[in-house]
Amino acid sequence: SQWPLKRESLQQAHILVAEQLKQGHLKPSTSPWNTPIFVIKKKSGKYRLLHDLRAVNEQMHAMGALQPGLPNPALIPENWLLLIIDLKDCFFTIALHQQDTQRFAFTLPAINRESPDERYEWTVLPQGMRNSPTLCQLFVSAALQPLRDLWSEVVIYHYMDDILFAQRTEFTDEQIQQIYRTLKTQHLEIGPEKIQRTAPWRYLDLKLTEQVVTPQKIELNTTLQTLNDAQRLLGDLQWLKPIVGIPNHLLAALRPLLKG
């Protein structure tokens, strides 16, 4: 059932739900499933809608991580040129099967009980679902396969929504348009500000030039309030593992956090 929300949080929840409903990420629901939502305020001052899916995750078989580690850009040949893109709202471009949307329902309480509560369900991959990162990896990998087949000489790394292309020469406008067209067939979008064509490039918290790879400053959030927080922490530690030598048994001790 839904937790009580303070008036400000409830007002923001109505605004955020209306935005997601307009974008087609939510639809009205009569589902018997019902797990709580809450709202947090980000450092930027904007609000974020979160859905507590722990009860749903308990009913779900974990797919596990299909990518055992992060791609290492240091293995790219020296003086190769890069093209790095960041996909826009990757989870929200992956549609759920119609039979599964009912499992991801929540109730939006009316403000001051002025009307009946409203119930909605996600139509796209929800954040906080234990298998969302793995499904995102599989989906993006399948979307990139035509480019891998087309460009056998191009190195293509991808992790979640971050994609790196590397080749001996500068990427042409035609190649970039080919990437746009290929990803768009799977409804994956690249924001104009999410594409890096010149050095220094930034990829997976690394700073890259034609000759050098250096880590950027990273901050670990150890205040875990949601499953998504735990997923981000484990992802950051996985990234740090080869740099600072985090042993496998320490990471394994933290994996129960991913159960929600």
Image: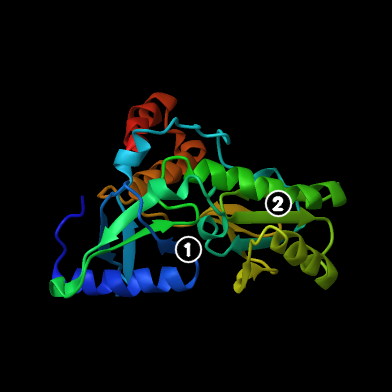
Q: Which of marks 2 and 1 is in front?
A: 1
Q: Can residue 151 be seen in this view?
A: no
Q: Which residue is drawn at 55% across and 37% down?
A: 69
* Residue placed most toward the observer, 243 or 174: 174
Q: Kindly identify the residue that appears in the image at 45 percent across and 33 percent down.
A: 245
Instruction: Give the residue at mark 1.
Output: 25
Given the image, on which type of amino acid does mark 1 rest?
Answer: His
Q: Horizontally, is 72 left or right of 103 in the view? A: right
> Callout 2, which amino acid?
Ala
Find numbered disc 1 in the image and state the secondary structure of the residue it sits on: loop
Q: Is residue 65 visible?
A: yes
Instruction: Looking at the picture, tell me which residue is in the foreground, 185 or 151.
Output: 185
Left or right of 36: which side holds 7? left
> Label 2: how many residues lie within 10 Å, few (<14), some (14-19) or many (20+)?
some
- In this rendering, the count of numbered labels is 2
Left or right, 72 with reference to 134? right
Residue that badge 2 annotates: 143
- Percent from the top left, x then y, of residue 232? 40, 48
Percent coordinates x, y for residue 99 in the rendering: 50, 45
